[in-house]
Image (tube, coloured by chain):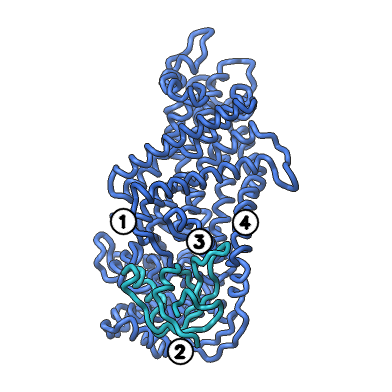
Amino acid sequence: MNRQRKVALVGNPNAGKSALFNALTGARQKIANYPGVTVERKAGRMVLPSGEPMELTDLPGAYGLDPTSPDEEVTSKVIRGEFVGEAQPDALIVVIDASNLEQHLVFAQEIIALGKPTVVALNMLDLAERDGLVLDPAVLEQELGVQVVPTVAVRRRGLAELAEALAAAETRHPGPGQTDLSLTERRFAAHAMASAAILSESQRHRLHARLDRMLLHPWLGPIVLLALLFVIFQAVFAWATPFSDALEAGVGALSGLASATIPAGFVQDLIVQGLLAGVGAVVVFLPLIVILFAFILAMEQSGYMARAAFLMDRMMAGVGLSGRSFIPLLSSFACAIPGIMATRSIPDPKDRLTTILIAPLMTCSARLPVYAVIIAAFIPQRTVGAGIGLQGLVLFALYGSGVIGALIAALVLRRSFTKGAASGFIMEMPKYQLPNLKDMAIGLWQRAWIFLRRAGTIIFMVTIVLWLLLSFPKAGPGESQVDVSIAGRLANGLAVVVEPIGFNRDMALALIPAMAAREVAVSSLATTYAVDTGDDEDAEAVALGDQLKARWTLPMALAFLAWFVFAPQCLSTIAVARRETNGWKWPAFMLAYLFALAYLAAGATFWIARAMGLS
Amino acid sequence: MTLDHLPLGTQARIIAVDWSRLVAEEGARLRALGIDEGAKIAVAHRGVFGGSDPLAVVVGRMTVAVRRVHAAAMDVEAL
């Protein structure tokens, strides 16, 4: 059998490559990394008119074959067939933005000159029309010497034609063109081609210029951004509640079913107290995570994210970073892993290292389960002023503490451990467009799946191990099961260390498995209290929130929240940081400074809250 | 006049760039975006909260964010 042939999408950033990739391959995509580097490799399947399937990869956006970032280096090497462990594509689809021909044709010429079977997708034709441009693809075809297919990825226009053109391109062998043209010569040629292909252009007041006047306004812009972030965090909490409640009810029903059908004993305990109490407590936060990611994806797809980077650049420059760090840091609000991986778009190495080190301080979605449970249990559900809920306000304060901590950490790091020349900020502002529902759905599905897979593997195993450690050895009459268990004894040791910052034994116990992933703290608390009340015949299944309220004071709860703002409790993040920094030195440094911060912050919170008379 | 002093909205042409003042990769990135000698350019937005950094410049059909240090290395003449 012949090996499956490969075709790659290549083009400038903001050419609409990802949308075209989604339209061509659908939701079935394989996401991995290129071997040896942490540049994301997205692959899917597209079918030629003959019925032959080809593997389609979406190469990172690049401005040329001379790389200026790790991303561009991957693209350049893969296209030239120099990337070890990645087969050279058999054919290429060059994606160009129809409303920015002068720029995108520069790289297109460079690719076509390589002489591989190539097709040009003249993408986002609808946006060009919106801007008042009328184009003649036939002129471009003549000038470039390859087939040019008009596409509107988001409306699935031109996809079949693209596949046909691809099949036809494989039989035409134009051979290598002029590969020694300078950038200036190619730019000159691009201008000439664009003016020939643009039939008419009406000077419309462009939408994005008008929007920019408001959104990039020196005073109004930052206020809009701050308001937007505030609305996002309020909405995440408010909208997720009904879905979370429904999931919780579902898990409760499963528990009831398992208790009724499985004979009492070890297996029933394992499933009800271990599996369902543990994994169930984490899975109910899926709606929260999906809603937060929906906002982040919408910001990215609409083009607003680059504006946010622009607005944040001044502040980031103040601590020695650039607006480019804002995007990885904002992604870290969902999860530090894609956040740290997104730092590869930062060209300066010291800048990038600093961003990696502070990324875990952004409140990731794994902390939300912890925050949500504690806030729901201890912060009353009332409003302070018009429409602002106290619970939402506390959540906002937790996010804010992480951000401020990160800025201070960056400032200190840039003057000490990651000292270097001040870095610059050069970034294209993409055109505004409405987010596409299908692309959003694919992005959300991929992220939800990663979360569920974590819940199904890491969290599942940790929960089971913890349950076993909690359940053995069995307590005698009159003894507390938790006190007698192996886990309880381990936690007693740790409890001595965390006692000065207000943590009790149960909290210390929750910290141990939460080293694997923060959200495990919730499931381990749930498991601990399920085991603790499990043997009591009269005890009703009490919700975790009520258990906490009965056992913790308010200063303890606040200290626990403060701990999780800073503590680097996530094995995956540490593993990614190791891979990105090529060694253990920086991950070890990250662990040390973040645990120190967590200890200080939790301690300060506990003692200040106590002094204020909160209880 | 250098680009960082160009009034907002004024069309200008880059007549000279002192590449030696810029980090090599950043120079390459600017050229890849078409910010090079001979290019027509205008400043659309400047600064946040009354500051003068960063700048959003319009070159061709693109809006590109740059820092003041980049703009200061570029000599422009108003058109």
Circle nearer the N terminus (3, 1): 1
Q: Secondary structure at mark 3?
A: helix
Q: Which residue is mark 1?
A: A37
Crowding at dot 2, Cα within 10 Å, few <14 / some 14-19 / many 20+, comes out as few
Of circles 3 and 2, which is in front? 3
Could you tell me how far apart the alpha carbons at marks 2 and 4 are, in whole angstroms?
A: 44 Å
The disc numbered 2 marks a residue on which chain? A
What amino acid type should be assigned to the residue bearing mark 4?
A: Leu
What amino acid type should be assigned to the residue bearing mark 1?
A: Val
Q: Which residue is mark 3?
A: A309
The reply to whether residue A449 is in sight is: no
Could you tell me how far apart the alpha carbons at marks 3 and 4 are, in whole angstroms?
A: 14 Å
Q: Which residue is mark 4?
A: A228
Of circles 2 and 4, which is in front? 4
Q: Quadrant location of residue A530?
A: top right
Residue A48 tag number = none
Q: Secondary structure at mark 1?
A: loop
Could you tell me how far apart the alpha carbons at marks 4 and 1 are, in whole angstroms?
A: 35 Å
Q: Which residue is mark 2?
A: A138
Circle nearer the N terminus (3, 4): 4
